[in-house]
Image (cartoon, grey):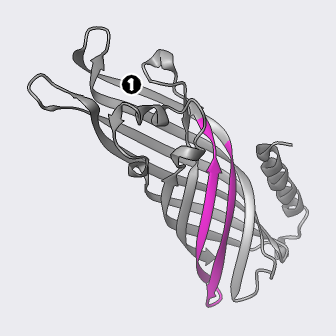
Amino acid sequence: MSRRSVCTVVVVAALSVWLGTPAWAQQSSVSLTLGYFAVRGEDTRISGDVITENLGLFAFGLDQFNNTSVGAEWLVGIGEYVEAGLGVGFYQQTVLSVYDDFVNVDGTEIAQDFKLRVTPVTATARFFPFGQRSAIQPYAGAGVGFFNWRYSEVGEFIDFNTFDVFRDRFVAEGNDVGAVYLGGVRVLVGSRYGVGVEVRYQDVQGVVGIDQGFLDERIDLGGLTTSFTFNMRF
């Protein structure tokens, strides 16, 4: 069974239990997150990844794609040890780049911008081994995400057939499904509020297309988000 299938089974099972749980046992809360998204390193990225291919021609670093992320999630307790969630997030970053070994005839850099935006909508299930009534609540979970994304390369480029420099823009966008794995700890503050830290890993990829002017066929959208969380119960 694939990792995506496992996550889907986990979420479906949690929702099934939720639907069969009495209303009095279901406690809702909203979680707001402020985090930092770090893309996968070069050694773990998928083959055919356009950003990895760009590293061989342009002067930039993968870590320049790392940036702040924000999110919100509606959470519902399912009994004492399980919590189901439905959330949305947002990440965007623009990386400034130039050609590694080429400049304009006047000596100026041939510059371009690489921009990546990802908006995930996720369904997750969390397991609390010590229950949701304890003051300190470690948890682990998994889920499935629907990732809306857009990637663009805008600026000056070289036609290597003529070595002419031209200005253009290449844009790809899509909606892809991927797996989500998470873990964290939540600390209750009074009866209604909670703060915590969560680490979330997303495993997803999209297609940009060599026929659309990119240097490779796919884009790796996977990475790790480390977030501070703030919860408010209803």
- Quadrant, the C terminus: bottom right
Q: Is residue 144 left or right of residue 110?
A: right
Q: Quadrant of residue 31?
A: bottom right
Q: Is residue 63 left or right of residue 155?
A: right
Residue 108 visible to the viewer: yes
Residue in the picture at 45% in, 43% down: 117
Residue at disc 1, secondary structure? strand
Question: Whole-percent x and y of residue 21?
Answer: 89, 67
Residue in the picture at 46% in, 36% down: 51
Q: Is residue 185 magenta?
A: yes
Query: Which residue is the site of mark 1?
Result: 170
Q: Residue furthest top?
A: 162
Main secondary structure along the magenta-highlighted residues? strand
- Quadrant, the N terminus: top right
Q: Residue furthest left?
A: 106
Q: Is residue 60 magenta?
A: no
Amino acid beneath label 1: Phe
Residue 234 visible to the viewer: no
Q: Which residue range is magenta in the image?
A: 178-205
Q: Quadrant of residue 74?
A: bottom right
Q: Residue furthest right?
A: 20
Q: Nearer the viewer, residue 24 or 220?
A: 220
Callout 1: 10 Å neighbours few (<14), some, many (20+)?
some
Q: Quadrant of residue 194?
A: bottom right
Residue in the picture at 61% in, 65% down: 199
Q: Is residue 88 left or right of residue 97?
A: right
Q: Nearer the viewer, residue 31 or 64?
A: 64
Vertical arrangement, residue 77 with respect to residue 169, above or below: below
